[in-house]
Image (cartoon, coloured by chain):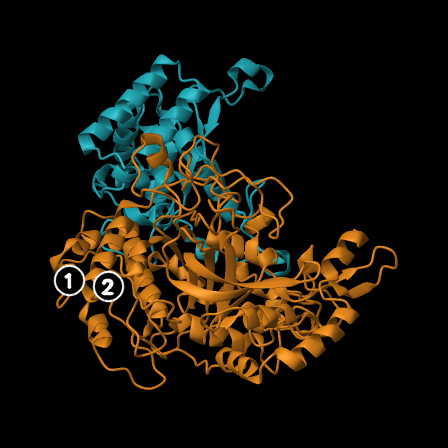
Chain colours: A cyan, B orange
Amino acid sequence: MVQLTRREMIDRIAAAAMAVSAMGRSADGWSQAADAASQEDRRLLAVPDFADFRSFVRISAALTGIDATQLAPDSRVDATGSPNGADPSQAVKQAYFNLARIDLSAYDSLKREFDQNLGAGTGQSGQQLSAAATLLLKSGTPGVADLTRSIIMAWYFGVWYEWTFDTSGESDPSLKPRFTIVSAEAYTEGWIWRIAQSHAPGYSNLRFGHWAFPPGAGLELGVFELK
Amino acid sequence: MPIGRIGIRADGPSMLARVAWVLVTAVYLTPAIVANAQQLSTASRHALACKKYPANTFLSDSTVTDQLSGKRLPNTELLALPCSEEVSGAEVVGKPNSSAAEGSLNSLFSRLRTPLERFQNGFDVYSWLTFVALNLPADSTSELGAPEAPTVWETNFYPLDEVMHATEDGANVNLKNLPESCNVARQKASGPEPTMFVKVDEVAFNQPFKTGPLVDQQGQYSLNTIFMNSAMQTFIQSKNHPLDTFHGQQAFKGIIEFPPGDDDAGILGAMMIKASWRVLGKTDDPNEFHTVRAYRYFAQARPSSCDIQTLGLVGFHVVHKTKNRHQWIWTTFEHVRNVPSESEVRSGQFSQPAYFFYDGSARAANATPPQPWDPLHPPAIKSQIVRAQDIGTDTQAVNAAAHSFLTRRSSKPTFWSHYELISTQWPADFSCASELGGLKTDQQADPNCSPAPTFLPNSTLETYVQHDIGTNGGVPQATSSCIACHNNAVAYQDIQFDDGKVAGKDNPCLSKSPTQACSPASDFTFILEQVCAPMIDPHTGALDTKICMRDH
């Protein structure tokens, strides 16, 4: 195992980001960035300096409507262990985190605007968080609205979309969003499948005969509750 | 194909040979040998005791060492198995009366680890505790590591072929009911009585998903054996709902749920073992292995043949169902000399001077051997296997501490130090795994409850399904995952209800009959598929009870 300091790791991510920029953000470039985050540096990323990551998970919970403890159980603030177990898909989620930070300027703007939308000290109810997140999709700051969409899509589908896509571009193929599947594990971990109580095409954990059982009604999903 | 079936099915000697064998037996086979074999094979098996251990208990903790230094009572083991895992993801500062507080293990539970890593390390120390408790000699007068001393599990667990009925209408051949050719082999052989019987069939030599045999550098197939504890055997051979035959499984309407281990109730619960072995040759040093003397029975030979070999343990799965881990806990060990890791091969820096399943050449690694796969005529090509993913650094630290403990405890070097934990897979979503809230496994959005690590192969038992795990993190549903694969295990249950309706939307089984099965899921074990399920004759459409689906 290659041992890296946190500083070296950050440098590597930065280098990966620069490489992606130099490649014009090709799909391969994104894929390489995801690989750098999810494989070689996986061990170091697990070091429990979670402050930045927790912030990302908090915004993600507001954007997706899924509780932060469900999105990333290991990002709990107490981090002292929980009877609800741990998170073996942590590397996937940290890959999303690292992808979101490739353009640090846009990411910092997103964080700042989220806090501004929320309003300092005015409460953190589900409804307020959701409203603050929704406003991000209408942000006029370059990159913020697209980054917001990409973060939502990543959690739900395990797919990272490039930031400059136009969802109305059906008639012009050149305007269709370019995307990359973050990893094989991310593909199966998309929240859309759990919420629909279904599975990603070509992959299923569900047992033979599962169709004979009444669905679990989503009760165990811990879906973000609006207060 | 019918011809193939006939070829596989005709596994006994001809009638003429049977008559000849009866005569030979009557004249030559001494009653003493028969009695001896029966005595060994029917040695009293008993349910193993277990106890509740403090969280993250390691071998060197006083709760373990006190037992090991104590005097054993009759019919009890020197070291009790853990009834259940007691693991914690909480940060540990120090543990009183524990070497973990003084040594390197303490760091494995420190704040420098995530909860996931601390839990993983807790499961790994549980695995070593279980491994040593199972592999202590059953004979109280023998030390840990005494050569050829039958272990606790070999003595008290039930081999697959003594539980599942391989045929509907006849008794299995096994250690209790030796085939004729093995009696002959025993008569000719010198040395101790064999204590294991291996029928060299698909289960014994073919890797999962029929990916082929593992061939060592001496050209011998590795052999796999499956055992279960009395909790599993009792459940399967229940008088009320026998699951050891095809028809018994068809008639069973309940949900197949093996009993779980429970600390509070002091119950061990269901436990199964799959072990892989090498046939030791003249160039092998038996002091490097845990060994057994075993019959190797080739049922498909014409006539069937049998020999007696010394087998060396090279791989060891232990699987334990517990109250809070309904997906079971999957522990896997290997001999350190099995294979190098891919990173060792890449760097050219090897931790061992030689390997059993790797020859140092530049041949492509982890390729399935060419057909035909005939254990009687192993191919000239030897396996070239590497471990696709390194053993985790924390697991390596646990291994080092365990080896140090074993070395300190023994008066001489013990071969158990040649075995290392690869990892332990466990369901990481605890509320899901304990089925809290009344949701059964079949209702969970993910019945596997988030296995950690996501993938886990043993290089001798999942040799050819290590896909991409070292380079790309593994491929879902392709790279070996104990829980995800065994989640697909089923029995031959007829899941239609008594009222004739098929379970489904109009007949919601949980609301009407909470104990009735709506799917034939067999609780994460493929053992139940080892009954002889009849094939459908392609010409007549009728069930042919003489041909087993298992053999195809």
Q: Is residue B304 left or right of residue B429?
A: right
Q: Is residue A73 left or right of residue B62?
A: right
Task: Report the label total.
Answer: 2
How crowded pointer 1 is (Cα within 10 Å; few <14, some 14-19, many 20+) is rated as some
- Quadrant into which the C terminus of chain B falls: bottom right
Q: Residue at x 26, y 23 (%)?
A: A14
Q: Say what secondary structure mark 1 lies in.
A: helix
Across and down, in percent, residue A80 comes to 22, 55
User: Where, by quadrant of the figure, is residue B289 drawn?
Assistant: bottom left
Closest to the observer: B100 or B250? B100
Across and down, in percent, residue A51 comes to 22, 40
Across and down, in percent, residue B527 comes to 57, 64
Q: Pointer 2 and pointer 1: residues touching (CB < 8 Å)?
A: yes
Is residue B427 in view from this perspective? Answer: no
The three-letter amino acid code for the residue at tag 1 is: Ser
The three-letter amino acid code for the residue at tag 2 is: Phe
Chain at numbered mark 2:
B
Question: Which mark, by number, is residue A119?
Answer: none
| Mark 2 / mark 1, whichever is N-terminal | 2
The residue tagged 1 is B99
Chain at numbered mark 1:
B
Q: Residue at x 48, y 73 (%)?
A: B193
Q: Is residue A65 left or right of residue B209?
A: left
Q: Residue at x 48, y 79 (%)?
A: B40
The residue tagged 2 is B58
Cα separation between marks 2 and 1: 8 Å
